[in-house]
Image: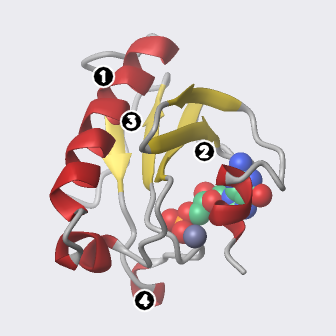
Amino acid sequence: MCLFCDIVEGKIPSTKVYENDYVLCFDDINPVAPVHVLVVPKKHFDNIDALAADPEGALYSAEITKAISEVAKIKGVTGSYRTINNCGEKAGQTVMHVHFHVIGGAELTEKLI
Ligand code: 5GP
Ligand code: ZN
């Protein structure tokens, strides 16, 4: 069982922001900023390493990139947002279905890098 596969399949509800054949983008249940959307490929990959290694990785990566930009546009934060991917438990990944956080709508001052 995978939480985000269940959300993609509609078994668990989410607040949809954007969707196409490749991705589902929905509001994070525990937002850290006024805009906090998760960009999730509809195909299951455990993490970004699995995504990169998959024969369809390039296709899904391109679709994810376009979806991130589309989400920013829909939420009105084009040119002013942060994208985060946590890969692996030690890096803070808690849902083992690759996803990208799109965060914005506030001044993003705290920086790791
Ligand atoms: P990670 O820690 O793996 O990088 O990010 C997982 C994210 O999924 C967290 O920000 C968490 O708030 C979010 N999340 C966990 N469960 C749910 C859920 O059932 N629905 C939604 N919309 N977000 C969730
Ligand atoms: Zn999954």
Q: Which mark is residue 90?
A: 4
Q: Amino acid at mark 3?
A: Leu
Q: Amino acid at mark 4?
A: Lys
Q: Amino acid at mark 1?
A: Ser
Residue under the image location 35 percent in, 34 percent down = 68
- Which of pointers 3 and 1 lies earlier in the amino acid sequence? 1
Label 2 within 8 A of ligand 1 by Cβ:
yes
Residue 30 visible, this orientation: no
Q: Which mark is residue 32?
A: 2
Instruction: Give coordinates of residue 14: x percent, y percent.
Output: 76, 41
* Mark 2 nearby-residue class (10 Å; few <14, some 14–19, many ≥20): few
Say whether residue 111 is left or right of residue 36: left
* Mark 1 nearby-residue class (10 Å; few <14, some 14–19, many ≥20): few
- Which of pointers 1 and 2 lies earlier in the amino acid sequence? 2
* Label 4, label 3: how far apart the Cα atoms are: 23 Å
- Which of pointers 4 and 2 lies earlier in the amino acid sequence? 2
Q: Which mark is residue 108?
A: 3
Q: Which mark is residue 80?
A: 1
Residue 62 position by quadrant? top left
Badge 4 element: helix
Image coloring type: secondary structure
64 or 94, which is in the foreground?
Answer: 64
* Label 3, label 1: how far apart the Cα atoms are: 9 Å
Instruction: Give coordinates of residue 11: x percent, y percent.
Output: 83, 55
Q: Quadrant of the N terminus?
A: bottom right
**Is label 1 in contact with label 4 (beta carbons under 8 Å)?**
no
* Label 1, label 4: how far apart the Cα atoms are: 28 Å
- Which of pointers 3 and 2 lies earlier in the amino acid sequence? 2
Badge 2 element: loop
